[in-house]
Amino acid sequence: MQNSACIMVILGIDPGLVKTGWGIIQSNGYDNISYIACGIIKTNINNDLYNRLGEIYHAVCDLINVYSPAEAAIERVFVNTNPESSQKLIMARTSSILAIHNSGLSIHQYSANQVKKNVTGKGHATKDHVKMMLERILNINLENTKSDATDALAIALSHVNLFNL
């Protein structure tokens, strides 16, 4: 019989200003990982930037209050060719990080390629391949799940894999 104190809930975040994906998994060791929930924080595009950042912050705080994760993992930002888009992505990511930090959780960050490699074994795997592996590992159907949410699940699973939680 395993000790229930070893059960750990992990929050994964795939940041974005329009849509921030989130995923929650539970781990009791690598061979015992289960899906809890996933979804998208969709900001109101009619609001100004600062209100949208606040929406992300408060939604992440709500997720933490509802699911009580022990740790959180977030995707590391990549710089793209559009500086304004990169800046907005960084701000959205920072809103999530502040919510996690203010909740007292430890936070870990992973690049997209690192997440793909940890989930599929290939650093340049397609989103479909990542989704297929998540379905196998978590024993769920993600057919109607948005990619932002599945990316967040993959980030959480990557954290479990890296730390053998």
Image (cartoon, helix red, strand yellow):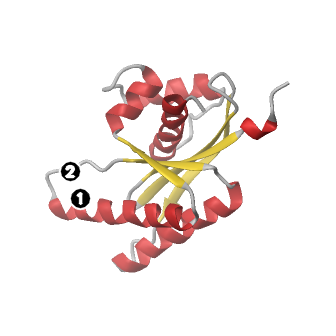
Residue 123 point in image, percent of width and height: 33, 26
Circle 1 sits on which residue? 86
Please indicate whether residue 103 sits to the left or right of residue 28 in the image. left
What is the crowding at mark 2: few (fewer than 14 residues within 10 Å), some, or many (at least 20)?
A: few
Which residue is drawn at the image coordinates 59% and 22% (left, top)? 136
Circle 2 sits in a helix, a strand or a loop, which is it?
Answer: loop
Asked whether 50 or 146 is in front, the reply is 50
Circle 1 sits in a helix, a strand or a loop, which is it?
Answer: helix
- Residue 159: which disc? none
Q: Earlier in the sequence, mark 2 or mark 1?
A: 2
The answer to whether mark 2 and mark 1 are in CB contact below 8 A is: yes
Residue 134 point in image, percent of width and height: 55, 29
Q: Amino acid at mark 2?
A: Val
Number of labels in the image equals 2
Residue 57 point in image, percent of width and height: 49, 69
Quadrant of the snapshot with the N terminus: top right
Please indicate whether residue 115 sits to the left or right of residue 32 in the image. left
User: From what the image shows, is residue 130 above or below residue 83?
Assistant: above
Residue 17 in sight in this render: no
Circle 2 sits on which residue? 79
Q: Amino acid at mark 1?
A: Ser
Residue 8, picture quadrant: top right
Which residue is drawn at the image coordinates 20% and 51% (left, top)? 79
User: From what the image shows, is residue 49 above or below residue 72?
Assistant: below
Please indicate whether residue 34 sits to the left or right of residue 113 in the image. right
Q: CA distance from mark 2 to mark 1?
A: 6 Å
What is the crowding at mark 1: few (fewer than 14 residues within 10 Å), some, or many (at least 20)?
A: some
Which residue is drawn at the image coordinates 38% and 57% (left, top)? 16
